[in-house]
Image (cartoon, coloured by chain):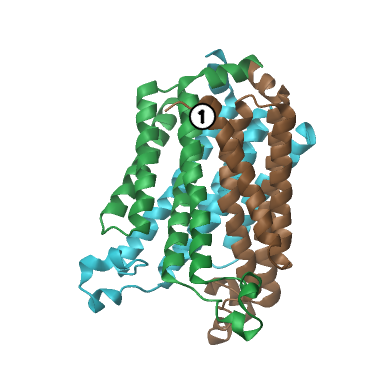
Chain colours: A brown, B cyan, C green
Amino acid sequence: MASLSQLMENEVFMAFASYTTIVLSKMMFMSTATAFYRLTRKVFANPEDCAGFGKGENAKKYLRTDDRVERVRRAHLNDLENIVPFLGIGLLYSLSGPDLSTAILHFRLFVGARIYHTIAYLTPLPQPNRALAFFIGYGVTLSMAYRLLKSKLYL
Amino acid sequence: MASLSQLMENEVFMAFASYTTIVLSKMMFMSTATAFYRLTRKVFANPEDCAGFGKGENAKKYLRTDDRVERVRRAHLNDLENIVPFLGIGLLYSLSGPDLSTAILHFRLFVGARIYHTIAYLTPLPQPNRALAFFIGYGVTLSMAYRLLKSKLYL
Amino acid sequence: MASLSQLMENEVFMAFASYTTIVLSKMMFMSTATAFYRLTRKVFANPEDCAGFGKGENAKKYLRTDDRVERVRRAHLNDLENIVPFLGIGLLYSLSGPDLSTAILHFRLFVGARIYHTIAYLTPLPQPNRALAFFIGYGVTLSMAYRLLKSKLYL
């Protein structure tokens, strides 16, 4: 297993592993935030979820949408749309032998921007807080994609 | 290509590859389930999709939403939200040199929980069947994230 | 770092890296397309996003949905649902030592099909253009999953 231990001794790859795990854990937190608001505000999408709150017609009144729940769901979907490209492009970028400090700068900016994006979305903070956080994360991923294609293009 | 053959001779990595392929194929099945319900129930989101069922106003009546279709779509989105973290964290966890039997236990629990989640969502089974399946998958991913950060944190 | 340079000298892996970066960049373009339509059509999901267009009740009229914006969002979600399996299965397939020309055929078909899917969805082109693009991408991913499980199954 020489190759595996070498992979995990590579500092860029280890940094990528750490930052990715953090940003994915943050994304998973959005599921619990949705569940929290659904339960405390009694807002459900499925009849079986509110069966405990009453029988028949009495339970159906909880099948509704709520601004707060929809806001968390939009933040969650935005995370998915941005973290999936980071995951794929970042992994390949990490394996392409970039400079350690450049790579760590990319990872830190991305993770910081996504955490700030969540804070700006859920508070909510006035624009352009959220837009700025979005574009920093977006720019970081595009920068990694550019470096990857420039050095390793093989079509 | 010594490193590649070594990677695929690593048992943890091969197990991860197999379970991931299975759970991603299961997720892809949700697309066909959505298409099946859209076609059999004539429920469409795009005007061009129901052009074959009539002209003009006659076709527009099929542009609607349906409980069954929305249920499959929610199950699909929940899969995405949970399988993406498993994909990223699980890959890095597999490369971090975990104990084989511990790793396989994680993968089996996750894949089993997600398959049961789909069954519970689509049947639908009464709660807490779906909630339990969700939290098992969620806990497995968090457990891998915890082990990864504990042994390999590099910020 | 012998293993890393070997990984990036592997032609299948380099091809996978290039095509994946392209298809993920294409998916990221959907975010800017959504933002473009939201701004030009003044259609927003969050009150803070349209605060610049007026005060109080005057701004609230921009909190609405729009066919064009919803179309882009559906295309984006469909991308996510299909590119995530390609990312996971394609990565593992690339590491399993496939024939170079077979692998590149898979990657090219997938990326071409997803680009055509976006064109067919956003134009929109009449069916079965979009359905065909969807099924080519879907079939390519299933073909890689089949080859992977056939050669490397380890449960």
Residue at position x 58%, y 61% from top? B129
Question: How many residues crowd mark 1 within 10 Å: few (<14), some (14–19), many (20+)?
Answer: some
- Residue C150 locus on image (x, y percent): 40, 29
Q: Quadrant of the C terminus of chain B?
A: top right
- Compare residues A79 and B100 and report the one nearer the observer: A79
The relative height of residue B89 versus residue C34 in the rendered view (above or below) is above
Residue C127 at least partly seen: yes
- Residue B24 locus on image (x, y percent): 48, 44
- Which kind of residue does numbered mark 1 sit on? Tyr
In the picture, measured across the screen, residue B147 lies left or right of residue B83, that is right
- Residue C24 locus on image (x, y percent): 50, 43
Residue at position x 48%, y 27% from top? A153
In the picture, measured across the screen, residue B17 lies left or right of residue A105, that is left
Residue at position x 47%, y 46% from top? C26
Residue at position x 48%, y 64% from top? C37
Q: How many labels does the image show?
A: 1
- Residue A3 locus on image (x, y percent): 63, 18
Determine the image quadrant of residue C110. Answer: top left
Residue A1 at least partly seen: no
Task: Look at mark 1 in the image and give the residue it sits on.
Answer: C154
Secondary element type, mark 1: loop
In the picture, measured across the screen, residue A55 lies left or right of residue B142, that is left
Q: Which chain carries label 1?
A: C
The relative height of residue C74 versus residue B115 in the rendered view (above or below) is below
Determine the image quadrant of residue A66. Answer: bottom right
- Compare residues C34 and C78 and report the one nearer the observer: C34
